Every structure is written in structure tokens, then in C-alpha cells.
Image (cartoon, rainbow, N blue to C red):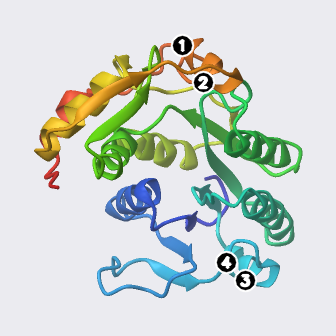
Amino acid sequence: MGNRSDEVLVTGGRGTLGRLVVRRLTAAGVPVRLVSRRPRPADAPPPVTWITGDQTDPVGMRAALDGVGAVVHCASSVRSKADLVGARVLVDAGAATGRPHVVYISIVGVDRIPLGYYRVKHQVEAVLQESGLPVTIQRATQFHELFLEATRMLSRSPLVPVPAGVWFQPIAADEVAARLVALVSGEPRGRMPDIGGPDVHRGEDLVRACLHRLGKRRLVVPIPAWGRTVSAYRAGYHRTRGPAHGRTTFTEFLHSTGAAA
């Protein structure tokens, strides 16, 4: 990190990816600050400096960023306005507190798939790239964990509908965390090559594998679907085109989990 502080702020540090980033940073002996809307839980790692606050609060974010050398920005919200406001607050606070290196996790295809959530992620990328701060942006495909949790929710019904003809390239969240930790320890690199999992699977096959791991018998129904979003998925815009791949297959991930209904 050059002459900057070694301390790293992780936003969204209680999420699927953020937890893994925090774990890897602390294991490497990196001092970590975590900003979360929730109070510090009893199981929070002792070395972590816990800051209770909201990423959209300018005063709170300035305090959170004061003295840090880098930020791993994992915070994300289904409320699109919060994501965009949070990015602008982060940029303003960063400019006022020493210009930390910002590493942002985005999603493969945010510039090609017409989902509102994706459009906002793409806008956040632009805000960071135009900020003048040192920035690294890493896009990744969907996490293995996402499919398992989505299947768990969908399996509340005896029928599990899945869009037909869509192939996915899921990646282990921990491999993405490892990538972000490697990036935050280096120099800013702008937009990085996309990263995805080692294999490509039909959506219905992923769901069936998850159901089997969860010990649930459900009928998976591939549903014909049309529209711009589904067409973009069928075109594979959410998958990688380059050689940057994780190593953990979806099958290996499922075997490693203690998944239960």
C-alpha cells in the first residue's frame, strides 16, 4: 500500500462476501475496520474495529475512513438509491480523508443486462472511476452460495420454476474474497479482467444439485421465458470471456457445506 496506512475499511462486512474478506484480512495480520448498520455481535473477530453506521451518512463515513489506507467496498443494497448515494458519500469522504485505494466488487454483465440492480452497480462503477480516487474494480459472476440460498427459499413450494435455456458460471465467494484481498494489498489497477467459476451449468441443474444437497424432493420446472433480460442471460453476458477463473467447482462447494433444510 505504499506510504498509506495499512488499515483497511470493509463496507458490507457482515454480508456473504464481506465476512470472508474480513476473515482473510485479519488472518493475514491486516488491521481491519468494519462499518455496519448493526451493532457489534458477540462473534465478531476481536482484532476488528467495529464502526456502527450507515454508508450513506457523510459524517459517519468520514470518521470511518479517517486514517485508513484502503477500502474494500462490498456494501450493496436492494434499494438502488442507497447504493448510488453510498458510493458518492464514499468518494467525498475518501477525498477528504487521504484518498484511500478503493477496491469495488461488481458483477459480470452489469453493462449488458437490463436489470435495475445491475444498472445501479454500473453507475457506481462510473462514480468511482470518475472520482479521481485510486480505484480497482473487480467484476465476478454469481456466487455458489447465491444458488444454494435461492434454492432454499424456492423450495418452500413443491414446484421450483427456473428460466429455461440459461447457463451460469458460479464462483466460490471465498475465491472472490481472496482476489479482493490480493488487489487491496497492491497498487490501483482500474477495471480488472472479469472472474468466474471453473464450470458452466444449466440453471435447472444447479437447482437440482442444491435440492439434493438440502435433502428436499421438489419438481424443477424449466419455464420458457422471453424479454430483454432473459435474452441477455441466454446470450451469456453474465459469464466471463477471459481466463480468470476460480478453481472450486459447484459440486465441490456443495460437498463442503453443511447445508440443511
From this view, report whether residue 78 is shown above or below residue 41: above
Task: Kindly indicate whether the residue at mark 4 contacts the one at mark 3 (C-beta within 8 angstroms).
Answer: yes
Measured as percent of width and height from the top left, residue 62 is found at: 76, 78
| Residue 60: image tag | 3
From the image, which quarter does the C terminus lie in? bottom left
The residue sitting at 50% across, 18% down in the picture is 224
What kind of residue is marked 4? Answer: Asp
On the picture, is 7 further left or further right than 171? Answer: right
| Labels in figure, total | 4
Measured as percent of width and height from the top left, residue 27 is found at: 32, 61
Give the residue pinned by disc 1: 242
What kind of residue is marked 1? Answer: Gly
Mark 3 or mark 2, earlier in chain = 3
Instruction: Say what secondary structure mark 2 lies in.
Output: loop
On the picture, is 180 further left or further right than 56? Answer: left
Give the residue pinned by disc 4: 54
Disc 4 versus disc 2: distance between alpha carbons? 30 Å
Residue placed most toward the observer, 213 or 161: 161
Measured as percent of width and height from the top left, residue 142 is found at: 47, 36
